[in-house]
Image: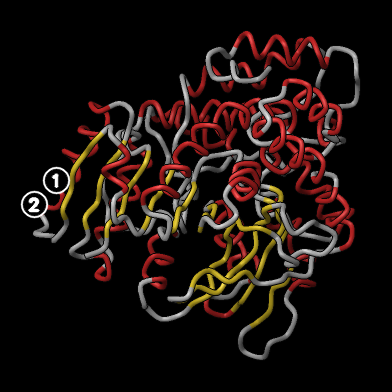
């Protein structure tokens, strides 16, 4: 019997989505699934939805909910983490807006820039605590992380626990995959592609036609403007949702139906995306809101309306939608579990693991997002050929990743200040120390450990 622990399962979006993926897998039938959350009532809410689905579909799963992680981890083979601390959106607002008051420009504030730093400082310590318990109780388990900031979390965890089988998972690569076939005018089975970089800072590295192996990247670059400049973005999604009073599903592994949206701003959500295409001849896998968090010149060319509308829609979608268990694959972790348990070997599009030479110019210790072969012996990253210009952008992240990890592991306020000063998006020294001290005080108790 396979034992799986979902940490943070009180979140309906995460818990229900992950359970739906497990329930449709014949390989996972008979598994014990434990829903863990520090909020027992929230975990029981998810449990009730899951139990009703299992009963109505006559499935073979053992389900329970708990706030006590240690006994839950005993004999666990897989642990899936998706947590936040405190009031997610209230703290996110602080990460994004308070640095602006001190003169620091950032376009989003979740994964990169000052906001990404403070988000990391809050969320990584509890994840390290979870990983310590895994090392103590079930050290052979594979741990999957869905929390952000992904690359900084994974980098810090591997620095403290180098023997832990810890892998970061993100479905952002679908933002690329769902567009490639229609852009090229072929079926999905007619193309093969790979992408790589850092999480939310990744580009397509190659794409080819399966019929003859020929390079399809020139065709992508030729057709990208006509295709992407006319695609709806989150401004259009938000407007459509406001008119209808209904949310539009924009997440998940594959298709998103936006065919009913016709009034479109050119390059909506993709002004920076277009600049990367033009200047670097590389196709980003995600929108301005994510990609631009890492680039010091992104603020003057990103689609700020689209970014604000994305945040508004994301907050409203999470707050107003009641997720339901559906027989549709939402994430990619279950196929990885299946392969680790002996299902056929396959190539997964994106995992976050230590670099170990997969991307030149980056140190082995930084966690990168690359494709991987999955089999019963583990997760084996695949080297990708990142264009030299994009490698330059990625290299700018080395210092901030290292100092974020060391500031947390050494519990050092001084290293937080240094982390700010090496961040490529921070272009002034004035106000750095004041901002750090303001955030430590404002985000108590989560940042109280910084001395």
**Quarter of the image where one finds residue 403:** top right
Kindly identify the residue that appears in the image at 15 percent across and 49 percent down. 53
> What color scheme is it?
secondary structure
Q: Nearer the viewer, residue 284 or 10?
A: 10
Q: Secondary structure at mark 2?
A: helix
> In the picture shown, does residue 41 fall above or below 264?
above
The image shows residue 421 at horizontal and vertical percentages of 86, 27
Q: Nearer the viewer, residue 410 or 386?
A: 410
Q: Which mark is residue 352?
A: none
Horizontal side, residue 25 vs residue 125: left or right: left
Q: Are marks 1 and 2 in contact (CB under 8 Å)?
A: yes
Kindly identify the residue that appears in the image at 51 percent across and 40 percent down. 147
Q: Nearer the viewer, residue 15 or 136?
A: 136
The image shows residue 289 at horizontal and vertical percentages of 67, 37
- Rate crowding at label 1 as few (under 14), some (14 to 19) or many (20 or more) other CA atoms within 10 Å: some
The answer to whether any part of residue 346 appears in the image is yes
Residue beneath disc 2 = 55
Q: Which residue is the extreme one toward the bottom?
A: 212
Q: Which residue is the extreme one toward the front?
A: 136
Residue beneath disc 1 = 51
The image shows residue 399 at horizontal and vertical percentages of 82, 41
Q: Secondary structure at mark 1?
A: helix
Kindly identify the residue that appears in the image at 66 percent across and 58 percent down. 354
């Amino acid at each position: 019997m396979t034992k799986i622990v979902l940490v943070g399962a009180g979140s309906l979006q995460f818990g229900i989505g992950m359970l739906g993926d497990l329930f449709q897998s014949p390989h996972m039938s008979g598994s014990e699934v434990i829903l863990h959350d520090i909020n027992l009532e929230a975990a029981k809410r998810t449990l009730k939805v899951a139990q009703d689905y299992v009963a109505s579909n006559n499935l073979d799963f053992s389900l329970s909910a708990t706030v006590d992680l240690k006994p839950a981890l005993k004999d666990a083979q897989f642990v899936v983490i998706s947590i936040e601390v405190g009031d997610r959106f209230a703290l996110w607002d602080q990460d994004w807006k308070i640095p602006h008051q001190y003169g620091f420009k950032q376009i989003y504030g979740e994964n990169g820039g000052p906001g990404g730093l403070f988000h990391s400082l809050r969320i990584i310590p509890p994840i390290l605590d979870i990983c310590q318990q895994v090392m103590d109780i079930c050290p052979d388990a594979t741990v999957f992380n869905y929390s952000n900031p992904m690359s900084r979390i994974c980098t810090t965890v591997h620095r403290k626990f180098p023997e832990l089988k810890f892998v970061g998972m993100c479905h952002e690569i679908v933002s690329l995959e769902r567009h490639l076939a229609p852009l090229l005018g072929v079926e999905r089975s007619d193309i093969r592609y790979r992408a790589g970089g850092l999480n939310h800072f990744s580009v397509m590295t190659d794409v080819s036609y399966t019929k003859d192996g020929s390079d399809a990247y020139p065709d992508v670059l030729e057709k990208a403007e006509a295709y992407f400049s006319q695609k709806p973005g989150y401004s259009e999604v938000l407007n459509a949702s406001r008119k209808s009073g209904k949310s539009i599903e924009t997440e998940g592994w594959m298709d998103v139906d936006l065919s009913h949206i016709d009034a479109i701003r050119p390059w909506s959500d993709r002004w920076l995306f277009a600049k990367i295409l033009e200047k670097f001849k590389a196709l980003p896998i995600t929108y301005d809101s994510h990609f631009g968090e890492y680039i010091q010149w992104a603020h003057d060319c990103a689609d700020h309306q689209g970014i604000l509308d994305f945040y508004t829609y994301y907050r409203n979608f999470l707050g107003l939608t009641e997720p339901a268990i559906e027989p549709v694959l939402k994430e990619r972790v279950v196929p990885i579990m299946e392969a680790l348990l002996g299902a056929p070997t396959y190539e997964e599009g994106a995992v976050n693991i230590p670099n170990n030479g997969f991307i030149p110019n980056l140190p082995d210790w930084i966690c990168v997002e690359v494709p991987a072969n999955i089999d019963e012996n583990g997760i084996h990253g695949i080297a990708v050929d990142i264009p030299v210009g994009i490698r330059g952008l990625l290299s700018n992240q080395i210092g901030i990743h290292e100092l974020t990890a060391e500031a947390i592991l050494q519990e050092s306020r001084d290293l937080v200040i240094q982390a700010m000063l090496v961040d490529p998006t921070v272009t002034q020294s004035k106000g750095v120390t004041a901002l750090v001290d303001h955030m430590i005080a404002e985000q108590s108790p989560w940042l109280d450990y910084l001395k």
